[in-house]
Image (cartoon, rainbow, N blue to C red):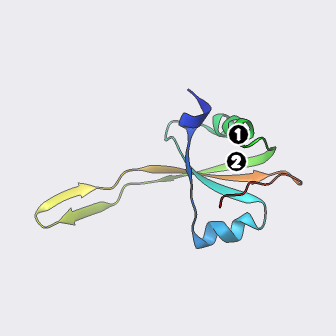
């Protein structure tokens, strides 16, 4: 797996912006990626040092449009804490 396949996109929300002040960045990642792969990918892509990685599996929600029913995509989020002195600008 390439490092760019592991990290899909940063998650920019109000809550993640508040966490960014504490040197914590949130990413949407591949559902099959583990914490070690996520840590290595972030360190290689952004050239920073990672202290810890927490992951959250978001289950798909049921949605319907008229008579058609379906589900949203499942997502895996990674909450990455950076070591002191490391930072990522996501502007």
Where residue 42 sits, quadrant-wise, is: top right
Q: In this view, does 47 lie above or below 22?
A: above
Is disc 2 surrounded by few (<14), some (14 to 19) or many (20+) residues within 10 Å? Answer: some
**On the picture, is 74 further left or further right than 57?**
left
Residue found at x 69% / y 39%: 45
**On the picture, is 85 further left or further right than 21?**
right
Q: Is residue 7 above or below residue 62?
A: above
Alpha carbon of mark 1 to alpha carbon of mark 2: how far?
7 Å
Which mark, residue 53? 2
Residue 91: x and y, percent? 65, 61
Outermost residue to the right: 85
Q: Do the residues labelled 1 and 2 touch (CB within 8 Å)?
A: yes
Residue 24: x and y, percent? 73, 59
Where residue 1 sits, quadrant-wise, is: top right
Which mark, residue 39? 1
Residue found at x 72% / y 43%: 46
Q: Is residue 18 above or below residue 56?
A: below
Residue 85: x and y, percent? 89, 53
């Amino acid at each position: 797996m390439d490092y760019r396949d592991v990290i899909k996109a940063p998650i920019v929300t109000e809550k993640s912006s508040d966490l960014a002040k504490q040197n914590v960045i949130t990413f949407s990642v591949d559902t099959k990626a583990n914490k070690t792969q996520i840590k290595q990918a972030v360190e290689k892509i952004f050239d920073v040092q990672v202290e810890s990685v927490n992951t959250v599996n978001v289950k798909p929600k049921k949605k319907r449009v008229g008579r058609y029913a379906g589900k949203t995509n499942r997502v895996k989020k990674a909450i990455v804490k950076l070591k002191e002195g490391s930072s990522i600008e996501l502007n």
